[in-house]
Amino acid sequence: MKPITPSTLWAIMSCLLAPDGCPWDREQTHQTLARFLREETAEVLDAISRHSPNNATTDAHLCSELGDLWLQIAFHAALANQRGAFDIHDVEAMVVEKLIRRHPHVFGEAEVENSSQVMDNWQAIKREEKEHSHDGRLLAKIPQTLSCLDAAMEVGHICAKVGFDWPNIDGVLEKVAEEISELREENDPAGIEAEFGDVLFSLVQWARHKQIDPEMALRRQLERFATRFGHVEECAKIAGGWENFTLEQMELAWEEAKQLQ
């Protein structure tokens, strides 16, 4: 039998899910694929955190990871197509319709002066859409699969839209300081966990006011830590191992690593 060489992703998915296609692919469901979608999303975020504009290597990496994520979307659409629900073209059509509806300043007669007004309109339209899709509670539609940092950020955005927010960043900083003080005073294990959560939530709201993505900020910090700790490890090897490397030497190596970045 002559190998099939489809030229598009949709054609490839159709071949893989055909009766004589790939046994593994044909066994998958939306539920079994969920973890792969999460993993590919995480890898895209990792590629973004490492990306430098106009750098051919990081551009290629980001392109590759976006392709892997697009594959997951196509896979889900192909499964839906098998049962006659929708296909990849319906997915695209829904996105197109949504983008047109949420950009009345481009495709309609609305007028805006800046990006802040664009976001205000976007959120207002989203609220109107959601009023027809759930019980009306503002926080009810935050996806449960969001990371906790992203969910905390979304909670802040939603509450701010109805005026439940600090009027300025000074108030947020005061709240962060208040929560840290309460954490220091707490002794009960359950209370410590609760106060620690309050500190994290307040810090995320400070990041929101400063227009910082806390998820990306923490991801980049982890990369910096790994790089610096790698230098500490190399210094420990030169010293003959961790048992021959004191804490003071580790701290000196850490500071040296910071200077090298």
Image (cartoon, helix red, strand yellow):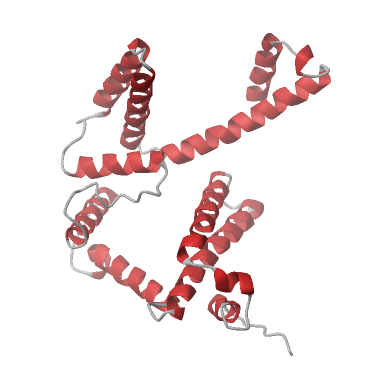
Of residue 235 and residue 86, the one placed in the foreground of this image is 86
Viewer-side residue, 194 vs 49: 194
Task: Indicate whether 36 appears above or below 107.
Answer: above
**How far across and down, in percent of the image, does residue 111 sit?**
19, 60
Asked where in the image residue 161 lies, by quadrant, the reply is top left
Q: Quadrant of the N terminus?
A: bottom right
Task: Give how far across and how far down residue 76 sits, in percent.
Answer: 47, 69
Residue 49: image x %, image y %? 54, 44
- Quarter of the picture holding the C terminus: top right
Q: In this rendering, would 65 be left or right of 57?
A: left
Q: Residue furthest bottom?
A: 1
Rendering coords of residue 172 (x, y %): 27, 26
Q: Is residue 241 above or below residue 210?
A: above
Q: Relative to residue 246, is residue 51 drawn left or right?
A: left
Residue 261 in sight here: no
Count of numbered labels shown in the rendering: 0
Which residue sits at x=35%, y=68%?
A: 95
Image position of 29 (left or right of 122): right
Quarter of the image for residue 196 reads: top left
Q: Residue at x 54, y 57 (%)?
A: 36
> Can residue 5 be seen here?
yes
**Residue lying at 63% horizontally and 24% vertically, measured from the top left:** 258
Q: As rendered, which of 180 and 61 lies closer to the eye?
A: 180
Looking at the image, which residue is at 16% across and 43% down?
Answer: 162
Q: Is residue 141 above or below residue 223?
A: below
